[in-house]
Image (spheres, helix red, strand yellow):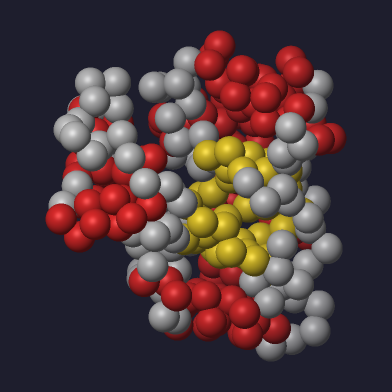
Amino acid sequence: MGDTGLRVSRLGIGTMTWGRDTDDHEARDILSAFVTAGGSLVDCADVYADGESERLLGRLISEMDVRDRVVVATKAVSRPGTERRFDASRAHLITSLDRSLRRLGTGHIDLWQMHAWDPWTPMEETLEAAEIAVRSGKVRYVGVSNYSGWQTAAAAMWQRALPGRVALASTQVEYSLLARGVEREVIPACRALGLGVLAWSPLGRGVLTGKYRTGVPNDSRGSSATFASFVQPYLNDNARGVVDAVT
């Protein structure tokens, strides 16, 4: 993972739908097949399914006794449905971390990520919370998510400014053949500053599978009340040309 000693599988599992659209049995089958195939990285967030994703993931890891075989990644910062959508204050982050640990049923999180940039909190306060999390033993590595190029570089350089600060291990950004904007600024910043890159929705929110070429299947995210708006941006002529080429 970047210039750190953390190693993860090339493919990871995203658990955004676990505990809501993906039930316990299906999640167990997915995790079992993934670990059996040698996968290690399992990514979650405190807001996925209002916390149920973390709770389900923690329960399955415990029941399957695979904690030492998986790299548990989760996120904090987002507060959907509130006046302050993103809160990267020290107070909110430390509280969120403790809640995530309880839901996951684990003593530490392998990779703790700042889910989004918070324009209302000084960056150094956010990164101080990351330092506190690592020094306390509750977190092993820290990353960011959905940061722009300059935000990624600023945060990484701040951590490098003084010896002994915890280096950022990674950034997680949307990256696929339908979303290549990060190639302009984010990816070069990561190369220059030694951050690993985790691509979310590498299948273009499901569109690159080709299943939307002739319409929206009834059992797809595109027809889901929760995720229809998530898929819709890639159901256009530009995306269709890319999907046809991939197919």
In the orientation shown, which residue stands out farthest toward the top?
25
Q: Hey, which quadrant is residue 177 in on the image?
A: bottom left
- The residue lying toward the viewer, choosing from 1 and 205, is 205
Q: Is residue 38 above or below residue 103?
A: below
Does residue 93 appear to the left or right of 167 in the view shown? Answer: left
Residue 8 locus on image (x, y percent): 73, 51
Q: Is residue 37 or residue 165 the one in the foreground? A: 37
Question: Observer-nearest residue: 51 or 188?
Answer: 188
**Exactly how many numbered labels are in the figure?**
0
Q: Residue at (72%, 48%) from the top-left corner?
A: 9
Q: Is residue 118 visible?
A: no
Residue 12 found in image quarter: top right
The x and y percentages for residue 178 are 33, 59
Q: Name the residue at 40% across, 22% down.
A: 20
- Decide: is 9 above or below 188: above
Give how far across and how far down residue 188 sits, in percent: 53, 82
Up the image or down, 118 lies above or below 210; here it is below
Residue for point 48% across, 26% down: 18
Q: Is residue 105 left or right of residue 126?
A: right
Along the horizontal axis of the image, is 13 left or right of 216? right
Corner quadrant of residue 31: top right
Residue 190: give x, y in percent of width and height: 59, 76
- Say if residue 42 shows up in the picture: yes
Which residue: 79% across, 31% down?
A: 67
Q: Which quadrant is the N terminus positioned in?
A: bottom right
